[in-house]
Amino acid sequence: MTTDSQEPRRIRIGLVIALTAALALLCCGGGTAAFFLDGLNGSTNSQAFGADCGKRGLVVDPNRTFERVGSLGDAQMRNAATIIAVGQKMQVPPRGWIIAVATALQESNLNNLGDLGPRNDHDSLGLFQQRPSQGWGTPEEIMNPEYSSRKFYEKLITLRDWGKMRLTDAAQMVQRSAYPDAYAKHEGKAALIVDKLTDGAARAAGSLVDLRCVFPGEISASGWTIPVRALVGSGFRTADRPNHFGVDLAVEKGTEVHAASAGVVITAQCNAHSANGGPWSCNVDGSPAIGGCGWYVDILHAGNVITRYCHMVRKPDVTVGQTVTAGQRIGYSGSSGNSSGPHVHFEVHLNGDSSNNGAINPLPFMQQMGAPLGLNEPVATAPVGTASP
């Protein structure tokens, strides 16, 4: 958490928001900071977001030479390119390409496997280890990477809200594997592969023409979304607030707060306390004299990333152990705990470390995930990851 003493569960929050043309300021915890509005001016131009937010669409040619990823060879990279190219032709959003590549990494390590004799898993074949006996097609058809990729996508897009699910859940609903959680470990590598082969699509969403960053309410190809649509106020570990381990998103009390990505809730509680460490209710507004995050939620995502959402107005809508989808409502903004005005304090932690030591700046992280924080204007696009009509 964010206290001068670096204790994991105690946090000091800052907020700077523009209230009027006279720039009257709300602040909490005694600090102020400049707005982080560069590149977040509401433009629908994909270049307004700067680097790492996707580029003009690149239609993948599986026959060209690709830069390798890790120990993957040329044939494996061509198979990954085929999976992506089929998804592009079918107009499956980029999130689907990552799910498909991750699935093939688990099932075959992107090798187009034939019958392995006694080492075969039943009659499983090909990139996705699809089984003729289960209706996936004939052995000859399944051994065609284009055919097997198309069959995977055809089943994936029938799943309601597949793009908002955890990758491993979506893959399992297609594959029905005996090891339902096995796909999760391949998400990072699959995103890297897609990113290499498509010139940035793994961080983006949208059409094949404009692989751009997402706007509020959309899910990026990497599976991330914006928790609230808001100005970004007090920043991460600024000079005057070195113990501020997140950013403040200025919203009115009662604004819906959404999970930034699919994951599992690992904390949902009140931790407000008085200056002397005594208990303090999270069901009332806090103040700079109160310590703690108020009502808050921690979510564990793929790759051992943790996100934190502080100062909710009442008990969160989610409970510990609950699986949530990207964009799912987890509670409502407020001003509980160490706060002098309604806002959402948002943190990102790496390596499964929920302490201050694991905290990183959320701004570049969310930018790279294709879901930059700030007042971006929504545009008319088809929802990512909904079931086909």
Image (cartoon, rainbow, N blue to C red):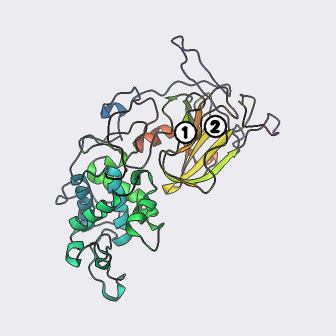
Region of the chain picked out in magenta, as a range: 271-279
Instruction: Please provide percent x and percent y for residue 71.
Output: 34, 66
- Give the mark, 1 or 2, whose residue is nearer the N terminus: 1
Tell me if residue 301 comes above or below residue 256 in the rendering.
below
Give neighbour class at mark 2: few <14, some 14-19, many 20+ (Cα, 10 Å). many
Question: Mark 1 — residue?
Answer: 257
User: Which type of secondary structure does the marked residue at label 1 adopt?
Assistant: strand
Give neighbour class at mark 1: few <14, some 14-19, many 20+ (Cα, 10 Å). many
* Residue furthest bottom in the image: 118
* Residue furthest top in the image: 22
Question: Mark 2 — residue?
Answer: 312
Q: Residue at x 60, y 39 (%)?
A: 245
On residue 98, the disc is none
- The amino acid type found where label 1 is placed reads Val
In whole angstroms, how far apart are the C-alphas of marks 1 and 2?
9 Å
- The amino acid type found where label 2 is placed reads Met
